[in-house]
Amino acid sequence: MPTPETIASIREFLINQGFVVHFDGDGESITVHVNLKHVRLTFGFRILEEQRLLQIEGYLPVVVPEDKKLAAADFFNRINWGLKRGRFVMDPGDGEVRFRQEFGYGSVANIVDIAMLYLANGGHMIDAFFPALTGVIFRDTSPEEALEQGTKEYELLSSED
């Protein structure tokens, strides 16, 4: 069963890859800052012991204003419909946005590899769709048009990998 030692293993791996990583709380979770093509953001890793999940969240550096929440929710719903791993979530109260992923753990033998796969997936999704989200929030881009823009950027970023 993953424990704070598992989080420490992920932390050690990230440090060895050149990331600056911080423990949160009593070591039950960590955060790492990542520079992407379109945005700098923070990812958090934590164990949800009761559900036997490792959760990885990317915290987007934008808050959706009250008058744009319905359009943003529509945009996120359109993106999430086609996703198999992860989802965009928005706090309906304060408008905070995250890209949230969880995976169940059985064996901890490959948990670091899986965590890095999910980190890469989350970074890729956020980087592709963040400019489109800012269009919805700040330029009155429709959710349909924003989805098309984000999908094109996702394909472009995928071809660069």
Image (tube, helix red, strand yellow):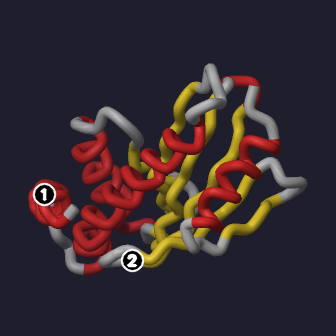
Q: Secondary structure at mark 1?
A: helix
Tell me: residue 6, above or below residue 149. above
Tell me: residue 48, above or below residue 21. above
The amino acid pointed to by label 1 is Glu
User: Which residue is pictured at 57% across the width and 73% down the height?
Assistant: 18
Q: Work out whether mark 1 precedes mark 2 in sequence or the reverse, and give the earlier one.
A: 2
User: Which residue is pictured at 40% across the width and 49% down the height?
Assistant: 88
**Image coordinates for residue 50, horizontal then vertical, percent:** 75, 24
Lateral position of residue 84 relative to residue 122, left or right: left
Where, quadrant-wise, is the C terminus in this rendering?
bottom left
**Image coordinates for residue 83, horizontal then vertical, percent:** 28, 38
User: Which residue is pictured at 43% across the width and 46% down the height?
Assistant: 117
Lateral position of residue 140 relative to residue 42, left or right: left
Give whichever of 124, 20 is nearer the camera: 20
Q: Which residue is mark 1?
A: 155
Tell me: residue 159, above or below residue 138. above
**Image coordinates for residue 4, horizontal then vertical, percent:** 81, 44
Q: Which residue is mark 2?
A: 39
> Based on the displayed image, in which of its 4 quarters is residue 159 positioned?
bottom left
User: Which residue is pictured at 53% across the width and 63% down the height?
Assistant: 59
> Based on the displayed image, in which of its 4 quarters is residue 153 positioned?
bottom left
As drawn, the label of residue 113 is: none
Lateral position of residue 100 relative to residue 74, left or right: right
Where, quadrant-wise, is the N terminus in this rendering?
top right
